[in-house]
Each structure stands twice: as C-alpha cells, then as structure tokens.
Image (spheres, coloured by chain):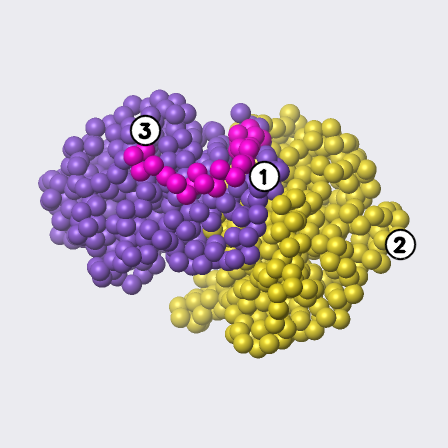
C-alpha cells in the first residue's frame, strides 16, 4: 500500500461518529478490563553502540577493529567470562545479579536502514524496512486494547509515532499539572460542555474536537490520579532522570496507563565516542537504578517490565574520528522481576560474519520482542497489533 | 471577490489577513487580487544578518582554523555560528509576519519543507534560506540546480564526501525520492549512476560552489534510460524531463495549498500546466485562478502548522515577538522549529501536528500571547471589568508588543462581531460552539477575538 493510500485509509478509520456519550466513555472506566501489568519502553536515541555497552572482551576482532575506542579487560564488569558490561553500567550489574536483567543480543530486521529517522520509524511502527506505516505499535495497542488515550503515555512534550494509533493517540506529558491546568481553562470546558451532538465526523475539525475531548478527560484523569503520588526517592538531576521519576509517579499512583515511552538522546557518537558514550550510559544506569528502587518501594516493580532499545547499533570498525558510524543489529535490555531467562538470553554477536557494510547481522527480529511483550506481558494478541505473526521468544 | 474566498486565498497564499485588507480587497475582481499577490512578491527581499566579527571563520576550512586559532577559539566561533542560526530562526519568523511579500514568504516556507536541510554554519544556512526565497516563484529546474550547489545541502546529504573512488549515494537518493520524482520512478541503479554524476560537487568555506575536478567522475553513465558523460546538471535535466517530476511537485503543492486529501484530476490539471516550463509562478497563478480552488470542500480543511498559527496570529494583531527564547520555546512545544527539521523527509504536516498535549497548547496560544492566558467567559449581562484593569493586574508572560490593545481599539472596534468571526475563523463554526459563543461572547472586541482564536476552528485554515 502506498503511504498516501494508507493515510487516507487511516483517516477513514478514524471517522468515529462523535456522540455525547463519547465523552462519558472516557471518564467512567471499568478497571476490570485492565490487568495490572505495565510496560515501559525506553529508547536510547541516536544509535547506542552496543559493542561498547556489552563488550565481547575475549574477541580479538573487537580489539583489532577498534584500536582507539575499545574498552580494555580491566575496565569492564565481567558477566560470564566472555562478555562484560561497560563500567558505567554498574547499577545494571546489580540488577543482573538479582536476576532482574535479561540482555538480548543481535536484535534487528532484514535490510537494515541506517538513517536515524527511518530506522526509528521502523522500530516505532514495527514495519518492514520497505513499508511506511503511519501508526505506531504501542498506538495500535491502545486502539485495540486500552481504548483510552491515557492507555499510553509518552513522558515528553510531544507525542512520538510509537504512540500514535490509527484511531486513538496516546498522551504526551511531562507535567500532568500543567496539562491539567491548561485543559481546565473554563472556556475550553464550556466549548466541550456545549456540544450536544457532534456535527462533525471524519474531517479535520471532527478530529480536533475528538482530540480535545480526549485531552481534557485524560488530563483530568492523569492529574487527579497521580497528584498525590510524590516520589520520595532522590533522582539524579537531569532531564532523563526527571522523566523516569514522573513515570514512576504515574505507575505508583496506579494510573490505568499500560504502556509508557521515554526517550533519551545523544547516542549518535560519530566522533570522540569514548567519553560521550560513557557519560550517557552513566546517566542512563544511575537513573534506572533509582527508578527500579522507586517501583520496588511501592511494590509496583513486579508488575512492570522495562524494555530499552536503540534504533540501530553502530559499525564494528571505528571511524577516523574516534567514533563509530551507523550500524545495524544491536543488543537490548529487558528489566523486570519475573524474567524467565535472566542474564544473557542468546549468543553474543558474531564479529566474523558481518554484512557487506561491516555491520552486525541480526538473529532476532525486533518484532519477535514486541510479539512476546504483547502476548506474554500485556495479554494481547500480537498479530492484531503488529499486523502479522512473529515467532515469540522465551524471556518472560 | 466575496469575503469567504478572500479569506481563503489570503490564508493559503499567505498567513491570513486583517479585516481592513479584506475590506479593501472586496472591491477588486479575482484577477486583480491574484495579480496583486504576485505584484507585491515580485522582488526578492533577502534576509541580511550582521556577520562581521567572525574573523576568518567564513574563509578558512575548519581544520585550518583550528590549527591557526587553537581548539578553544575555533570552537567559540563555531558555537557563535550555531547561536546565530537560532537568531535567524527568530528573524525569519518575524519576516513572515511583517513582510509585504506574503506569497513569496509562504512559498519559501513551503519549499523549506521540500528541500529539507539542517546546518549549523550560519553563513551557509543564511545563503540556503535566501536561495529558497529567491527561487520560490522562479523556475523549478534552476531551483533544483541551485539547491544542489548549496553548501548546506552538500553537507547535509554528504555530497561533499561523494568521490569518484568512493561514491556516496545519499544526495542522489534524496534528490529523487524527496525533491523531484518520488519513490517508484527510478531504480537503485539510477541512484548509483546519478551519484557518480555528482561526485566532486563541493563548496568553499564561504559557501560558494566548487567542482573538485579530480574527484569528479567524467565517465559515461546510464541514467533513466539515457546514456552520456553526465554531470549533475544533466541529471537534473533528465529528471525534470519526466512528467513524474512535475506531478510529484504538483501533488505537494496541492496538499499544501489546496487540500491534504488529494484530488487526482485537479493534480493532473496542475501537472499539465507545470510540465510545460516548470515555471512556479505560472503554476501558482493558475491554481489561484481556478474555480475549484474556491470549492467549499477546500475551504478551512487544512490544519495550520505551528508556524502558520504563530504568524497568522501576528497578522491579526500586527506585532512582533520580542524575545527569541520564547519564540523557540513556542515552536518546540508545538513540534516545529524552523531551520531544525526532524529529518530529511521534513514535517509530515496536517494531523501530525496534533496530539492531546500539542492541541491544548495550540488552543491556548492566542490567549497566552495576547492576554496572559485569559479567555473571557461571562454570560451576557454580567459585569465585565474593563480590560485595562484586568491587564494591569496580571504579569504578562509572553510579551509581544505593548500596543496590541491600542491597536485593537482603533482597528477592530469598528467591525461587527459577525464580520470579525468570518474573517478570523476560516471554516464554518460548529453549531453548538457557535451558540456557546453567542451566549458568552465578550462585549469587548479584543476579548471577542481572543475567544474566536481559542476555538478548535481557529486551528484550521
């Protein structure tokens, strides 16, 4: 299907007839429809270098390809006598020791795209490399399962493709109070209250009214449910940690939100990678450490699964600028209490057998990871959300 | 011309118009109004920036500069250049709001989302931006050739690293996929051959184009079924010989200026006009003169981009944002920062601007900017404070210009509320919202305008 056709079709699909009860439907909600399981998806944007994250330190090829940026054996955290974590990830080692961390290697897709935007779109929409979709996989999960905008929250100012559904979009907010205060502007309430029957349907104006209705009730619900939940843990002072803090407050307040998305940028390390990536990984793992403790303190951790991915890995061979260029397959982290196979889920990357660009080949399709999360964690049917069937994995 | 058509035309060919302009134009025929749009945009007024005080930054390659000045000094210049790009963002936005060349500025904004480019070198960015402005209504073939020679684009799509020995396909691919033909009208082999033709295309530190002869592949290429020792210009000529190219641009024009939902027949009609000589001005004239451009189904159906929304508000109340940081903040909150496109494919537009957070922010924006976030809501007959007293008590968070209140009193109070509503709000207002507005409408024309600008209908044009 061409992109344009798809767009038209999806705008048709969103031509829900608006009736007054539509508003009510957002406000009264049967909690029995919901499980308690939450999924937090974190993107390390820019393409995190997986090989300097989980280092194959017994492999000579790793060192010969990266004379300037490889990490020596004495500066990493050994995992299994073969792979070692970047020393800035020590909080993850603690999770690993408790059996709360599973690392899946070589995740990717056929014909990998090396553009940030395109590969991010592919990961967000769960499409093939050659297919352009206009809705995200978490958005389509909202469409079919939660059915309320706040089923999915992106803790940020604006909504990414991953949370845009065909008919319902998730909610983007970093600050529920601000969103609530804005939405409760008396004039806006009056506009919505006065709607007796919507004279609007599939057109853009109908879409705006519909979004406004959803925004208002979501803002009210999110704010009123979460306002009493103030985290007592002390998070590092940076934007990513703040986003995780907000996420923990949302989860701990028992919001019925099922899926969260947070992204952390800066991983596009073409030059002078060593220091930059170390700093970023430190920021990531220190925030994650407090986040997990925060969830544990409220007994929410057992019902929360955290997936961390990046849109692609980086090239095995370093470049001339002390960095690495865009690559393909990469490792990803799953953090949670009920992991079936904690530790290293599968074989480490094969540095002998690279693709023609000199990048790692994938052995696990990223949609198999999604499928597993949907089927085995979110009680959904993955083929309904992903559009076709994928093999599921065995990590939860 | 009737009022509805005029408001429609001014919103699509520009960023809306204030009541006095609409009133003046009513006396004119369609052809005269359309001619007027082109007449005022005839000349190109480029943006000029004070770029003195950059030392050798603009005439020395960066590595050499670093050797001469040391790391710290050269980095300082680079950061200064990056800061200037933010300043250009501010100046560009204000230019759209204040320039008389409304059509040229609107076209410039349109082309900036076709020839998507991002760069931190202020001189190169400025030249690129002015190239868009210069060719905005010119000849498309020349336009593509100029863009392909611009330093910012050569960098953005890595053509400065496209060498005979090791071709880089990035520019050739995007040239066809995003700038001219669209997917499906060329093969992977065409990309490879076109990339060869652009090898060696590069630029000097001051941004001037240069062909690095030793890096350029002069051998024969086979491109879109033609054979020859093509260079970049010949590739562009062959591309524009394809009707698919004219059609690709016309469908972009249609979705941006007419309706986000395509009408195949109307796009065909435009393509026939454009394909003759790729004259952008002729194409736009033709479009604004067709009957179907003014069809009901095309009026008020486009979701304004954040920039259109911000500039449009400034057209209602002629004022300029005073603080650069605020302007960037507003753009960031709504997801469109000029000169900082999200990726090479540009902003997707229309419904992609809208999510619950961005919509509520957009709805509140006019009140935030003009009246400290307040939107009047009192049923008729209730006592209403004079605006002055209200204004005195509140600290203004977003200052635009102190005179907007005065401007309203002198320029807007003479218009009936009905007229104001028809001029400010393009689509027909929802029946219920219309009733609600009548019940709660402020007796003060300034506050009434804020009310009008705060309903969902105002988000459309």
Is residue A22 a member of the stretch shown in magenta? yes
Measured from the top left, where is residue A344 in percent x and y? Answer: 17, 36
- Residue at the disc numbered 3: A380
Is residue B273 a member of the stretch shown in magenta? no
Neighbor class of circle 1 (other Cα within 10 Å; few <14, some 14-19, many 20+) is some
Query: Mark 1 near mark 2, Cβ–Cβ under 8 Å?
Result: no
Q: Are marks 3 and 2 on the same chain?
A: no
* Mark 1 to mark 2 CA distance (whole Å): 37 Å
- Residue at the disc numbered 1: A198
Residue interval drawn in magenta: A8-33
Q: What element carries label 3?
A: loop
- In this structure image, what is the colour of chain A? purple
Kindly identify which numbered label has been placed on residue B27: 2
Q: Which residue is drawn at 74% across and 65% down?
A: B412
Foreground: disc 1 or disc 3: 1
A82 displayed left or right of B190:
left
In front of the other: A195 or A237: A195
Chief SS of the magenta region: helix
In front of the other: A137 or B160: A137
Q: Residue at x 49, y 37 (%)?
A: A21
Measured from the top left, where is residue A18 in percent x and y? Answer: 54, 36
Measured from the top left, where is residue B299 in percent x and y? Answer: 71, 42
- In this structure image, what is the colour of chain B? yellow
Dot 2 falls on which chain? Answer: B
| Residue A8 visible in this rendered orientation of the protein | yes
Q: Residue at x 45, y 62 (%)?
A: B63
* Mark 3 to mark 2 CA distance (whole Å): 63 Å
Which quadrant of the figure has residue B96?
A: bottom right
Dot 1 falls on which chain? Answer: A
Is B52 located above or below residue A210 in the figure?
below
| Residue B245 visible in this rendered orientation of the protein | no
């Amino acid at each position: 299907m061409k992109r344009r056709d798809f767009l038209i079709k999806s705008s048709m699909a969103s031509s829900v007839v608006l009736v007054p009860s539509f508003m009510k439907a957002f406000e009264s909600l049967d909690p029995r429809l919901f499980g308690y399981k939450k999924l937090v998806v974190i993107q390390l944007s820019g393409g995190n270098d997986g090989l300097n994250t989980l280092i194959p330190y017994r492999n000579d090829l790793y060192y010969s390809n990266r004379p300037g940026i490889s990490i020596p054996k004495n500066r990493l955290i050994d995992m299994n006598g073969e792979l070692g974590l970047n020393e800035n990830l020590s909080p993850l080692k603690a999770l690993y020791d408790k059996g709360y961390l599973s690392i899946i290697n070589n995740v990717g897709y056929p014909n990998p795209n090396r553009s940030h935007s395109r590969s991010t779109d592919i990961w967000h929409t769960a499409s093939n490399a050659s297919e352009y979709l206009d809705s995200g996989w978490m958005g389509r999960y909202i469409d079919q399962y939660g059915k309320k905008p706040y089923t999915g929250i992106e803790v940020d100012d604006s909504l990414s493709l991953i949370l845009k559904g065909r008919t319902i979009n998730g909610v983007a907010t970093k600050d529920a109070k601000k969103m609530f205060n804005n939405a409760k502007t008396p004039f806006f309430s009056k506009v919505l209250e006065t709607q007796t029957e919507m004279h609007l349907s599939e057109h853009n104006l109908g879409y705006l009214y519909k979004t406004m209705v959803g925004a208002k009730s979501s803002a009210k619900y999110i704010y009123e449910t979460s306002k009493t939940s103030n985290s007592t843990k002390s998070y590092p002072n940076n934007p990513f940690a703040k986003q995780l803090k907000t996420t923990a407050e949302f989860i701990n307040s028992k919001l019925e939100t099922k899926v969260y998305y947070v992204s952390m940028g800066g991983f596009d390390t073409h030059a002078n990678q060593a220091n930059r990536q170390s700093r970023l990984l430190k920021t990531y793992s220190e925030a994650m450490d407090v986040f997990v403790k925060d969830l544990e303190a409220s007994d929410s951790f057992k019902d929360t699964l955290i997936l961390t991915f990046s849109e692609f890995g980086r090239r095995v061979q370093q470049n001339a600028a002390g960095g690495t260029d865009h690559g393909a397959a990469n490792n990803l982290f799953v953090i949670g209490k009920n992991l079936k196979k904690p530790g290293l889920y599968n074989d480490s990357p094969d540095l002998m057998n690279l693709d023609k660009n000199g990048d790692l080949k994938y052995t696990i399709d990223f949609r198999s990871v999604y499928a597993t999360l949907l089927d085995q964690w979110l009680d959904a049917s993955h083929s309904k959300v992903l559009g076709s069937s994928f093999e599921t994995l065995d990590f939860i | 011309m009737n009022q509805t058509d005029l408001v429609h035309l001014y919103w699509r060919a520009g960023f809306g118009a204030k009541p006095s302009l609409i009133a003046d134009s009513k006396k004119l025929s369609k052809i005269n109004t359309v001619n007027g749009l082109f007449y005022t945009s005839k000349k190109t007024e480029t943006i000029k920036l004070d770029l003195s005080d950059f030392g050798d930054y603009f005439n020395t390659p960066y590595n050499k500069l670093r050797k001469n000045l040391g790391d710290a000094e050269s980095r300082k210049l680079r950061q200064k250049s990056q800061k200037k790009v933010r300043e250009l963002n501010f100046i560009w936005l204000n230019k759209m709001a204040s320039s008389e060349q409304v059509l040229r500025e609107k076209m410039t904004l349109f082309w900036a989302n076709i020839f998507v480019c991002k760069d931190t070198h202020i001189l190169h960015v400025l030249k690129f931006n002015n190239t868009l402005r210069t060719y905005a209504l010119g000849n498309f073939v020349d336009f593509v050739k100029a863009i392909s020679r611009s330093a910012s684009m050569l960098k953005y799509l890595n053509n400065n690293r496209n060498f005979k020995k090791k071709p880089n396909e990035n520019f050739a691919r995007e040239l066809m996929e995003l700038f001219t033909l669209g997917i499906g009208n060329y093969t992977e082999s065409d990309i490879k051959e076109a990339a060869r033709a652009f090898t060696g295309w590069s630029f000097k530190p001051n941004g001037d184009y240069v062909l690095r002869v030793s890096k350029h592949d002069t051998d024969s290429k086979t491109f879109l079924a033609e054979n020859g020792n093509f260079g970049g210009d010949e590739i562009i000529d062959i591309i524009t010989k394809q009707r698919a190219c004219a059609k690709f641009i016309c469908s972009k024009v249609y979705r941006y200026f007419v309706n986000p939902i395509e009408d195949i027949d109307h796009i065909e009609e435009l393509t026939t006009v454009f394909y003759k000589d790729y004259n952008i001005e002729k194409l736009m004239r033709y479009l604004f003169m067709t009957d179907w451009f003014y069809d009901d189904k095309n009026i008020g159906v486009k979701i304004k981009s954040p920039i259109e929304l911000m500039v449009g508000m400034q057209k209602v109340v002629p004022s300029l944002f005073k603080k650069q940081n605020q302007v960037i903040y507003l753009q960031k909150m709504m997801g469109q920062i000029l000169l900082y496109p999200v990726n090479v494919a540009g902003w997707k537009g229309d419904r992609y601007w809208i999510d619950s957070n961005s919509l509520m922010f957009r709805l509140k924006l006019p009140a935030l900017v003009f009246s400290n976030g307040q939107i009047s809501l009192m049923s008729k007959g209730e006592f209403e404070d004079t605006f002055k007293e209200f204004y005195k008590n509140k600290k203004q968070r977003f200052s635009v210009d102190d005179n907007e209140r005065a401007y309203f009193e002198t320029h807007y109070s003479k218009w009936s509320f009905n007229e104001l509503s028809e001029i400010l709000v393009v689509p027909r207002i929802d029946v219920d919202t219309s009733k609600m507005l009548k019940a709660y409408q402020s007796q003060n024309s300034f506050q009434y305008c804020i009310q009008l600008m705060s309903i969902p209908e105002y988000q459309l044009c």
